[in-house]
Image (spheres, helix red, strand yellow):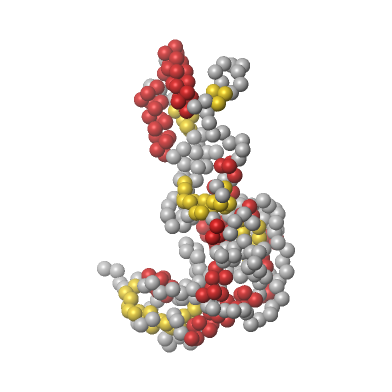
Amino acid sequence: MEKKITLTIDGREILAKPGQTILECATSMGIFIPTLCHYENTTNVGACRVCVVEVEKARSLVASCCMPISPGMVVRTNTPAVRAAQKMIVELLWSSGDHNCLTCEQNGQCELQNLVYWLKIDKPRFNIEPPGFAPDDSNTMIHRDLNKCVLCGRCIRACNEIQVNEVLDFSMRGSHAKVGPAFDENYINSSCVFCGECLQVCPTGAITYKQAKFAGRPWELNKVRTTCTYCGVGCQMDLFIKDNQIVKVMGNRDYGPPNEGSLCVKGRFGMDFISHPDRLKKPLIRRNKNEELQEATWDEAYTFIADKLSAVKKAYGPDCIAGLASARCTNEENYLFQKFLRAAIGTNNVDHCARL
Ligand code: FES
């Protein structure tokens, strides 16, 4: 039987697995500990210290996201010392950036803003000169404003550990420290593949979805979970919609596989075809060789296809017909397609485009 550890958090005993962190145990007990740099499925680095708690006999407050539990540990998450430290940390983070919530795209969904509110901070005590970094507006998809960066490193870990693109890292030191591609390049001149994982994990308005700017406040957007149509992987995504238009796309983290919340550049940024005026929404039929394509109903289109396939099969045999399926289809659709060719047409001439 697996060995378990007994510890106490906020006066309640818990039996937990060795190797778990205080944060994991507290969360499993329904105890809220604020976090900022912590991001599931990436390394705990203890960068922000927002998650500090008191541990009996420890010399100082400890970061609960990276502190493993030990037998008999006594933890307190809600003491005056803990709250004072958290307030100080959040005030320093707030003061050292240019967090102008009035115009920030993240207003209403910013984790720093949420912490300020949760900790009941009216205004920061410190007056620190903002770093004055030039925004990276080099591309059409991602906007970076390092003046709003809290150096939590989530984007770096998401880029390196989740997407394994290894584009981002810290550079410089102290108050000049910043995150970005090698040689201080902007995104467009770097090896970035624009998967957008960095903007998905950014807790503030430092990395944002460019086309979403001024397109709708978070509370005005309707969230709809759907399956990406680009390939057969079946990535789960959330469309954020206003006035029947997609404002932005985020990976769905609640569903789990197959993408665990990650998306590729096409899934995240390539959805403008949905409401494009040139999008084909009805079947077109060219009845004679030199005729223009004409709009038809689905019934007319299916009848036309069936007649043509039957005529070819009758005249030349089933092996004169071949089917090429699409990687945009689901497994089930591709299964039906090959079944149709094998069972209805009578040929094994079936293939697919494998990728887009
Ligand atoms: Fe624990 Fe940042 S969340 S140190």
Q: Residue at x 47, y 18 (%)?
A: 308
> At which x and y percent is residue 82?
49, 83
> At which x and y percent is residue 274?
56, 42
Q: Nearer the viewer, residue 211 or 329?
A: 211
Count of numbered marks:
0
Q: Residue at x 42, y 13 (%)?
A: 314
Q: Is residue 343 left or right of residue 222?
A: left
Q: Quadrant of the N terminus?
A: bottom left
Q: Quadrant of the C terminus?
A: top right
Q: Is residue 14 above or below residue 187?
A: below
Q: Is residue 245 left or right of residue 34?
A: right
Q: Is residue 276 left or right of residue 68?
A: right
Q: Residue at x 51, y 75 (%)?
A: 118
Q: Is residue 179 above or below residue 260?
A: below
> At which x and y percent is residue 220?
55, 57
Q: Residue at x 55, y 26 (%)?
A: 295
